Image: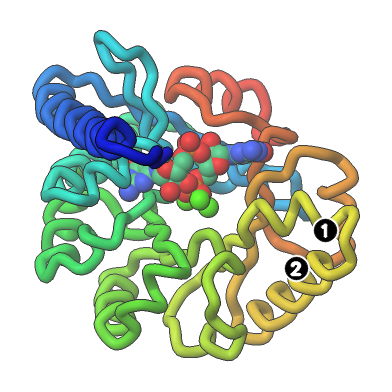
Amino acid sequence: VKESGGNGYCFYTNEIKKMNEEKLYIQNSIRKALENNEFTLYYQPIIDISSGNVDAVEALIRWNHPKLGPISPATFIPIAEETNLIQLIGDWVLREVCRQSKEWKKKNMPHIQIAVNISIKQFLQADLVQSISNVLQTYNLDPFCLKLEITESMAMHHMDYVRAQLQSLKELGIQLAIDDFGTGYSSLSYLKKLPVDMIKIDRTFIQDMVKHSYDLSIVRAVIQVAHSLNMKVVAEGVETSEQLKILCSERCDKAQGYYFSKPLLAKELEQLLQNKMKL
Ligand code: C2E
Ligand code: CA
Ligand code: CA
Ligand code: CA
């Protein structure tokens, strides 16, 4: 709030200074967090709607800061993205996902594909394909065990490069998904330009489709276009049986959300899968 006179101005710059200091503090903390193993991955089930089976999970990073407590990825990922720290976090996530996948394989768990969120800086790295291929080799894993999620807005801004990068990843045998679909400004026709396997409809549409016919129309259109392009559709943020019923009648393929399960620790997911594959 700018007031007249010197004090208002001073207050304003102090606020910015405080924000920058907080940012720097978080950035330094991220370095330490990587050294001290403060990050954890949680896994949220993705359900095949027609069978009710869990057929994949999405890896979601969690950070328990020793002084500040839990910090949401929605807060620290954008801060990490302003520096090269996002690459370090991204590498850690990929390695940890592969290590976990290998562990589940050794334990004879049912095959579960793991979806990993890739941030734009990481995605634009020239050696991304090589480094993913290296991690897969280190753990002796099939590329099919991984699915990469990139957001729609990201894919749109660097179209040519993104398309080439997606193509190389696809040739490696990795599954690809467009995340948060509907929140960018791309038209549906642009989907045909992307060599992806899956579209994830942003949860705002899933929330609103029950009340607003406009949102339901969008959901319906995305599903129809995606299917005509041989892509599967995941609905994000499914919280109610009413939403699931609509998705079922619209022939949406998969669903993810609190209605089925919140993100779980690896151990908790193991228990869930051992007791029942169905949610
Ligand atoms: P996202 O990729 O869109 O992930 C889905 C978010 O929705 C997750 O939040 C998840 O916990 C939440 N969610 C799942 N089901 C429901 C539901 O039914 N209702 C509601 N209201 N929310 C639900 P989370 O874990 O806080 O992650 C936030 C964002 O942070 C993610 O959005 C993703 O963009 C980013 N992120 C998380 N983990 C990573 C990571 O390992 N790497 C990168 N680059 N980004 C990550
Ligand atoms: Ca995601
Ligand atoms: Ca999403
Ligand atoms: Ca999101």
Q: Nearer the viewer, residue 232 or 162?
A: 162
The answer as to whether callout 1 falls within 8 Å of ligand 1 is: no
The amino acid type found where label 1 is placed reads: Met
Taking the spot 44% from the left edge, 82% from the top edge, the residue there is: 194
Taking the spot 74% from the left edge, 35% from the top edge, the residue there is: 259
Q: Are marks 2 and 1 in contact (CB under 8 Å)?
A: yes
Horizontal and vertical percent for residue 67? Answer: 26, 9
Q: Quadrant of residue 159?
A: bottom left
- Above or below, 44 against 185 in this view is above
Which quadrant of the figure contains the N terminus?
top left
- Dot 2 falls on a residue whose secondary structure is helix
Disc 2 target residue: 219
Which mark, by number, is residue 209?
1
Q: Residue furthest front?
A: 5
Q: Nearer the viewer, residue 179 or 269?
A: 179
Taking the spot 13% from the left edge, 18% from the top edge, the residue there is: 36
The answer as to whether callout 2 falls within 8 Å of ligand 3 is: no
- Dot 1 falls on a residue whose secondary structure is loop
Taking the spot 58% from the left edge, 23% from the top edge, the residue there is: 274
Q: Quadrant of residue 249?
A: bottom right
Q: Is residue 90 left or right of residue 68?
A: left
Horizontal and vertical percent for residue 76? Answer: 31, 36
- Above or below, 155 against 100 in this view is below
